[in-house]
Image: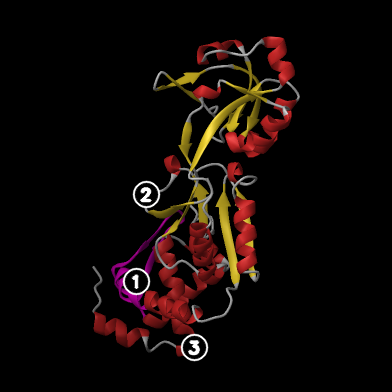
Amino acid sequence: MFSVTTHQFSNTVFSMKNSESLDDLAIFHTVVREGGFRAAARRLGLAPSKVSTTVARMEAALGVSLLRRTTRSMATTDAGRALADRIGPLLAGLDAARAEVAETADSVRGRLKLNVPGAVMPGVLPSLLAAFHGRHPEVEVEIVVENGIVDIVEAGCDAGIRYDEVLAQDMVSIPIGPRTQQIALAAAPDYLEARGTPAAPRELTEHQAIRYRLPDGPLLAWHLVEGGRIVTAEPISRLILGVNAIDTGLGFARAGIGIIATFRNWLEKDLANGDLMPVLPENWPARGGPRLYYPSRHAPRPLRAFIEVCQNHHDG
């Protein structure tokens, strides 16, 4: 088995061209950290061929094999792992030094890429992004809308927004938007006049409903509070929408197609003007609001600025 000493690596690494060594080492470390060339390329914004060529050039300069490659997998050699372990803290120190220098800048620049579910698009993000752009107008924000569970690092995003039940355990998260949200039921007056207003959750089995389906197949359950416990209602699914269209359901509810279950704050205007009527309001459940999540290491300056805005923007 191949072994290598720290002294050997120090001599060999610094014998590489100084103009290339720092960037090359950073690329190699990202390959090891991300577990592959394609994932590293996405993270770095480089072509996979550029990443592969860089590692091959390093191996030629060092005279050792750093990675074992097959058509389906990649693993570090003993030498590669030793090099990655040695340079990791050095690269982290450089990132921290850059961040400290950037802190002295008068304005934040760059790009912030967020991965969010459709549920937060209309009610949570507009006011937050308005506040963020007001303070940091030179940051470009890109929003990727996905409703499934997403590895934000693999997806090339700086941060994501999800609810507690699907947050990755190795991520840092903070509340964003309303701290709690209530799930409310509502229907058009014409629908309730024609079919009656349910007086208890069990009566929902006789009613038409507008339901949402998750990307992996199941319908979103209707949970209600009754007698101090959570009960599940099974209405008649008259219209089923994908959660990617979650903000379109109110239009169908106003048209009288059936009862809809959605966030209470989305219903406030319709309830106030009478376009929709509350259904079983004493049985509406509450849940925790969405959370911004991101890797714990080395948050870029635009993300740190956005985190600060989120922490100062209390809603609900």
Q: Write the start and end of the magenta stretch as one range.
A: 63-90
| Disc 1 crowd, CA 10 A, few/some/many (<14, 14-19, 20+) | many
- Decide which of tag 2 and tag 3 comes sooner along the chain: 3
| Farthest-out residue, front | 272
In front: label 2 or label 1: 2
Residue with the mark numbered 2: 169
Residue at 63% from the left image edge and 25% from the top image edge: 186
- The residue carrying pointer 3 sits among few (fewer than 14), some (14 to 19) or many (20 or more) residues within 10 Å by Cα, namely few
Front tag of 2 and 3: 2
Q: Residue at x 54, y 31 (%)?
A: 183
> Label 2 amino acid?
Gln
Tell me, what colour scheme is on the image?
secondary structure
Figure quadrant of residue 3: bottom left
Q: Is residue 191 above or below residue 81?
A: above
- The reply to whether residue 43 is in sight is yes
Secondary structure at badge 3 equals: helix
- Judged left or right of residue 208, residue 311 is left
Rendered image: mark on residue 286 = none
On the image, numbered disc 3 is attached to which residue? Answer: 19
Q: Is residue 80 magenta?
A: yes
- Amino acid type at circle 1 is Ala
Gap in angstroms between the C-alphas marked 2 and 3: 39 Å
Determine which quarter of the picture holds residue 82.
Answer: bottom left
Question: In the rendered image, which residue does mark 1 sit on?
Answer: 84
Identify the amino acid type marked 3. Ser
Disc 2 is placed on an element classified as loop
User: Looking at the image, is 287 positioned above or below residue 298?
Assistant: above
Q: Nearest the camera: 134 or 251?
A: 134
Residue appearing at x 43%, y 53% in the figure: 173
Give the total of numbered labels: 3
Q: Earlier in the sequence, mark 2 or mark 1?
A: 1
